Image: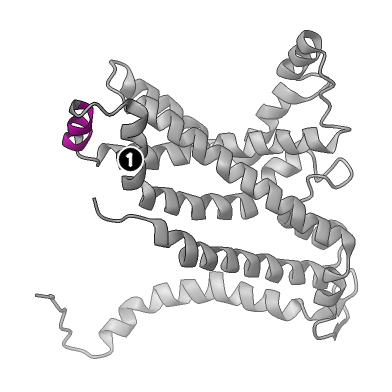
């Protein structure tokens, strides 16, 4: 039986939800509407004179080789960051879920990186991997003779920003995976063990299918994170370089809007970025969710 609240005044329910509606309209829909309007305007660098140009900003973007290259870079960066952070988060959660005396300490220490801001995360990894003063970079160069130089080599820079971005998100994934694993009945694992199933087979046939809702949720959240929340990492580590090799879409919005003062193009890029995220999320729900098992 569904319990329903009954109000003596018919206007009271609308008055109660009014603050939430105002907050949503002010901080979500109003900026989005302004961005959509500005994407069809061409303004001078100071914003004093504007003219309506319809979809010219979008046409210019999709005929710009640098912007098309940035879309490809974003795809590689987002996919690699999501796969790395989810895989490592699942691996560490599997190890931490095993019974041991210090598992509570391990769980607490592994959650700490999530509290680190993306910009700080980038600086920390820069102290490890910078070719001039990075500790790990100097060890790699002297021990293995590898010419590691993310300042000059685009592939090295991409690997560096992926590692820094994925490292911060591993903790987030770890928390959800460990919670999901603790919800799995131990009787299922023990029954499989008594039937002679190996640890890998128990994980593959029991643990992983029951974790599929968590895995699907984290896949969506990690893709969104790599698209929008990695600006601080890129800005502190490479600033889109070298040669635009790490210039992902969200950083190009900043470069064109705040450095290049091309507000119309920057707004158009924001609209495209938002559209890409909506399309990716819809595709994930349409095709990936079908393989998710919500019941044991």
Query: Which quarter of the picture shows residue 264?
Result: bottom right
- The single residue placed furthest to the top in the displayed view is 143
The location of residue 142, given as percent across then percent down, is 80, 9
Q: Residue at x 27, y 29 (%)?
A: 197
The quadrant in which the N terminus is found is bottom left
Q: How is the image coloured?
A: one colour
Q: Furthest-bottom residue in view?
A: 10
Residue 65: image location, x then y, percent:
88, 61
Among the 4 quarters of the image, the one containing residue 42: bottom right
* Residue 2 located left or right of residue 90: left
Q: Quadrant of residue 166?
A: top right
* 84 over 34 or under it: above or below: above
Q: Residue furthest left?
A: 1
Given residues 135 and 280, the one toward you in this image is 280
For the residue carrying disc 1, how many other residues have a C-alpha within 10 Å: few (<14), some (14-19), or many (20+)?
few
Q: Tell whether position 192 is magenta.
A: yes
Q: Is residue 83 left or right of residue 60?
A: left
Would residue 282 be counted in the magenta stretch? no
Question: Is label 1 in a helix, a strand or a loop?
Answer: helix
Q: Is residue 276 left or right of residue 99?
A: right
Q: Is residue 198 visible?
A: yes
Comparing 209 with 92, the one in front is 209
In the picture of the structure, the residue carrying the numbered disc 1 is: 205
Q: How far from the left and from the top, in percent, is residue 125?
A: 68, 28
Picture layout, residue 18 above or below residue 66? below
What secondary structure do most residues of the magenta stretch adopt?
A: helix
- The percent coordinates of residue 176 (x first, y second) are 38, 42
Residue at point 81%, 18% (across, down): 146
The residues colored magenta run 187-193
Q: Residue furthest front?
A: 196
**Toward the viewer: 248 or 256?**
248
Residue 294 position (above or below residue 14): above
């Amino acid at each position: 039986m569904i319990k329903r609240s009954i109000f003596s005044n018919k206007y009271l329910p609308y008055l109660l939800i009014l603050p939430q509606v105002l907050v949503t309209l002010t901080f979500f829909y109003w900026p989005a509407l302004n961005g959509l309007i500005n994407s069809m305007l061409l303004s001078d660098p100071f914003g004093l004179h504007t003219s309506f140009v319809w979809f010219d900003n979008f046409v210019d973007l999709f005929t710009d080789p640098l912007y098309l290259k940035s879309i490809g870079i974003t795809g590689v960066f987002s996919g690699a960051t999501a796969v790395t952070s989810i895989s490592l988060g699942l691996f560490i959660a599997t190890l931490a879920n095993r019974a041991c005396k210090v598992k509570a300490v391990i769980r607490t220490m592994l959650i700490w990186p999530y509290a680190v801001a993306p910009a700080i995360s980038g600086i920390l990894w820069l102290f490890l991997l910078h070719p001039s003063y990075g500790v790990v970079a100097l060890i790699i160069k002297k021990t293995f003779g590898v010419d590691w130089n993310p300042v000059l080599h685009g592939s090295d820079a991409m690997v560096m920003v992926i590692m820094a971005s994925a490292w911060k998100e591993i903790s987030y994934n770890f928390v959800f995976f460990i919670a999901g694993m603790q919800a799995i009945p131990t009787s299922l694992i023990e029954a499989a063990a008594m039937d002679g199933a190996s640890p890998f087979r128990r994980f593959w046939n029991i643990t992983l299918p029951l974790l599929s809702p968590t895995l699907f949720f984290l896949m969506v959240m990690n893709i969104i994170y790599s698209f929008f929340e990695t600006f601080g990492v890129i800005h502190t580590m490479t600033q889109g370089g070298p040669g635009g090799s790490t210039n992902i879409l969200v950083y190009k919005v900043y470069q064109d809007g705040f450095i290049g003062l091309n507000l119309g193009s920057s707004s158009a890029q924001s609209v495209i970025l938002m559209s890409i995220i909506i399309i990716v999320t819809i595709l994930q729900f349409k095709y990936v969710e079908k393989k998710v098992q919500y019941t044991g």
